[in-house]
Amino acid sequence: MIHAKDARILFLIKSLVLLAFLCKVSLGGLLPIPREVPYLIFQQGMHPYINVLLTFLFGVPLALLWLRVRTRQHLSGFYKLFVFFLMIILAVQTLLQVYYVNPDESAVMQIGAMMVSLFMVGLYGLVIPSLWNVQDFLRFVQRWTGILVLLSLVVLIVSPGATFKGGRFIGTFKHIPHMVTCATTAFVFSLGTFLMDSKLKHKIWSVLILLASFLVIILTGTRSSAAAAMFAFLLTLILHETRTTKGRMFKFGVVSFLLSFSLFFGLQTYELAHDIATGHSSLGGRQAQDGVASRWEEVERGAEIFKQEPWLGHGLMSKFASGNDVDVSNYNSFKDPHNIFVSAGVVGGWPLLILAAIALGFMTIGALKALKTFSIAKRQVAIYLLAHIPILVIYHVHLSIGGMADRLYWLVFGFVAAAVFEGVSVKSPKAPNQCPIRSADQDFAIYSA
């Protein structure tokens, strides 16, 4: 009998989670390495092919061990049903696209991308959350994202020219979204570890990462992530139950400060936020940009692409296609509309668009329900999800073929859908004689987009 805490399982899980971040690290600011080496190095970091290969090398053994685990954490039946429908729709649409939409492009590449996406969704969205504890997940991700944030600030001092792209801070990562995802995750998860830890040195570490990650978010000039971080902070402050006098005094002090700040500087703050959103002012070193107008341009451009194939879509690899040539270096952001509904329509047509809309609604309800849990770790993961719902809407559909945010979101979806208490599990088909007790918290249905 294999237990979920088997050393082999934990090693594979941690390797896969860490890989989601390391695959987007660029070592150009630290080491004199070439920008690209075919099939090995891409943008002075790990090549996407190596990323996918390592995912399968770690993921296939984990999936085989998962089949032999007698007891696993319970996942919401609704959530598993959603993943099942997602996989069916993606598989059917891809096969139809190969024959009717993209007959001139490589069928092997299209079907391969679909299989990689299905494997990663199943691995990060189902397998890992059913085997790993949510507290360990929160601590592990907070530790490593914190290290990468601090390393990025070190590189800023050592080699500042290599840490900015277009006036925005990218740190040790290949692109701005990777740095933003890492810093925002470190900030929100550090709020949870600060509340969970009792040792002073651990609390100091959490505070250090909180300050460093918020500084990095400002340096990136990403308005949506700064808003998500502040929303997560306020929500954590409100929902966390304070049982000590010091805790109550801290909460009272923060609330009093916010009320006083709003009273004296509320109008100026609103005007600044409005100017940043509409492009009259900038955040950090980022060039001023009208966020509302630029996002609407994304919707209009994506809608035109969607109308070309409204029922079948263009497939997962459409944003990497240049003529008949499909390659990771051919990524075209103009073919990747940053709106979850339009993006879903471009990838899989009306079926995937409708599924994304339904899932987004249920995900919001599920995240709100999960806030009622007494587990700090699960509640913090739910806060992370709730704070990122607006970002999910204005970004693309997350069907991972090797992305960082894609895999992280699926981990979050799965962990919120999983049972929260240690020792609470459900039977697998191989353990008919065991009758573990289910917690009421297991009945929370959590959903994803």
Image (cartoon, rainbow, N blue to C red):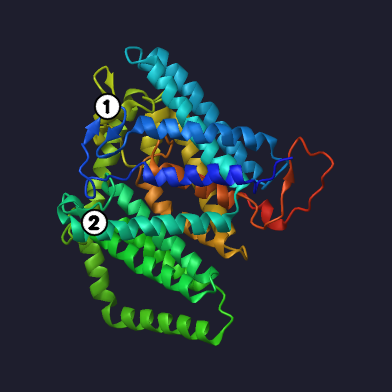
Q: Amino acid at mark 2?
A: Val
Q: In the rendered image of this protein, does residue 72 appear above or below residue 276?
A: above
Local SS, label 2: helix
- Number of callouts: 2
What residue is shown at x 39% (from left), y 32% (from top)?
345
Q: Describe residue 330's horizontal placement relative to residue 409 as left or right.
A: left
Q: Residue 155 got which mark? A: 2
Q: CA distance from mark 1 to mark 2?
A: 26 Å
Residue 322 percent location from the top left of the image:
24, 23
Snapshot quadrant of residue 240: bottom right
353 on left or right of 155 = right
Numbered label attached to residue 38: 1
Pointer 1: residues within 10 angstroms few (<14), some, or many (20+)? few
User: Could you tell me which quadrant the N terminus lies in?
Assistant: top right
Mark yes or no: residue 80 visible: yes
Whether residue 447 is visible here, answered yes or no, is no
Query: For the point 42% across and 80% down, which residue is it?
Result: 255
Label 1 amino acid? Pro
Observer-nearest residue: 366 or 209? Answer: 209
Give coordinates of residue 413: x percent, y percent. Answer: 53, 47
